[in-house]
Image (spheres, rainbow, N blue to C red):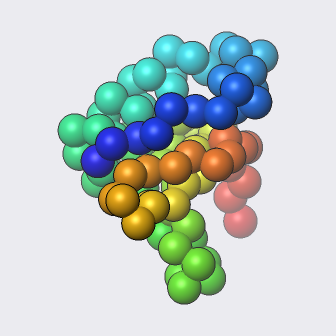
């Protein structure tokens, strides 16, 4: 699935935290296989909103939705908090 280019604020977020290489690796894996085991892709609750996430590393996740044109729009990269 094609990932749309990141907004500048997300690029800045990655740069400020030294996550550019991890983003490149995760987005490459995601492009080949959205269900790659290392990504831990999941549909978040509430399910009807259609918001998904995949892992950059154990601490950071990319939140995204699928557009009508079947592209992936990453709208946030955030800390991953486990319950």
- In the depicted structure, whether residue 39 falls above or below residue 66: above
Give whichever of 68, 13 is nearer the camera.
68
Residue extending farthest left = 32
- In the depicted structure, whether residue 45 falls above or below residue 36: below
Which residue sits at x=33%, y=29%? 28
Which residue sits at x=48%, y=69%? 43
Q: In this view, does 46 lie to the left or right of 37?
A: right
Q: Is residue 55 left or right of residue 37?
A: right
Quadrant where the C terminus sits is: bottom right
Q: Quadrant of residue 17?
A: top right
Q: Quadrant of residue 49?
A: bottom right
Q: Position of residue 40 (x, y in %)?
A: 42, 52
Residue 65 showing in the rendered view? yes
- In the depicted structure, whether residue 64 falls above or below residue 58: below
Which residue sits at x=41%, y=66%? 68
Q: Where is residue 74 in the image (x, y as percent from the top left)?
A: 56, 46
Residue 42 showing in the rendered view? no
Q: Position of residue 72 (x, y in %)?
A: 43, 51
- In the depicted structure, whether residue 51 falls above or below residue 27: below
Which residue sits at x=74%, y=21%? 12
């Amino acid at each position: 699935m094609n990932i749309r280019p990141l907004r500048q604020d997300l690029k800045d977020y990655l740069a400020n935290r030294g996550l550019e290489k991890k983003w490149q690796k995760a987005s490459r894996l995601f492009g080949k296989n959205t269900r790659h085991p290392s990504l831990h892709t999941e549909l978040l609750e509430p399910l009807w909103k259609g918001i998904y996430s995949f892992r950059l590393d154990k601490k950071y996740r990319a939140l995204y939705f699928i557009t009508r044109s079947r592209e992936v729009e990453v709208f946030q990269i955030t800390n991953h908090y486990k319950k």
